[in-house]
Amino acid sequence: MARVRVKLFAEYYSLAGNTREAVIEVAENATVIDVARKVEEEFPALRGRLVMGDRLSEEVRVLVNGRNVEWLEAEKTRVREGDTIAFFPPAAGG
């Protein structure tokens, strides 16, 4: 098992009961999608916000150690012990 730090922002923070940060355990060869599923298990109000089927939701933005997964391997990006995974809802405004 690997322990990773998860950070939740904006409405995700609120839906997770005002939890900004959590440490979760995932399998050694886990990917970002595995982490997102685990976060949805830990915080049921987030179900359907992070994962849609076998992909990340189109609305979620995910950073692994500060790098956008869109520039890595998207939901297939591997995570390792000690990584920080941040989940952001879409930004709005003008």
Image (spheres, grey):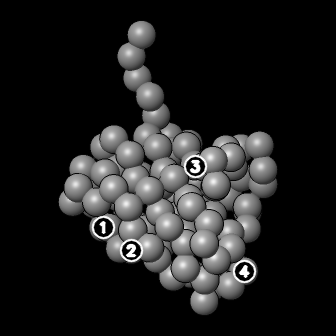
The answer to which image quadrant residue 65 occupies is: bottom right
Residue at image point 51% right, 53% down: 86
The amino acid marked with disc number 2 is: Glu
Which residue in the protein does label 4 denote? 29
Distance CA(mark 4)–CA(mark 1): 24 Å
| Earlier sequence position, callout 3 versus callout 2 | 2
Q: Is residue 22 left or right of residue 85?
A: left
Which residue in the protein does label 2 denote? 41
C-beta proximity under 8 Å, tags 4 and 2:
no
Q: Secondary structure at mark 3?
A: strand
Residue at image point 58% right, 54% down: 56
The quarter of the rendered structure image containing the C terminus is: top left
Distance CA(mark 3)–CA(mark 2): 17 Å
Q: Position of residue 75 (x, y in %)?
A: 67, 58
Residue at image point 51% right, 58% down: 51
| Earlier sequence position, callout 4 versus callout 2 | 4
Distance CA(mark 4)–CA(mark 2): 19 Å
In the image, which is nearer the foreground, mark 3 or mark 1? 3
C-beta proximity under 8 Å, tags 1 and 2:
yes
C-beta proximity under 8 Å, tags 4 and 3:
no
Which residue in the protein does label 1 denote? 44
The amino acid marked with disc number 4 is: Asn
| Earlier sequence position, callout 4 versus callout 3 | 4
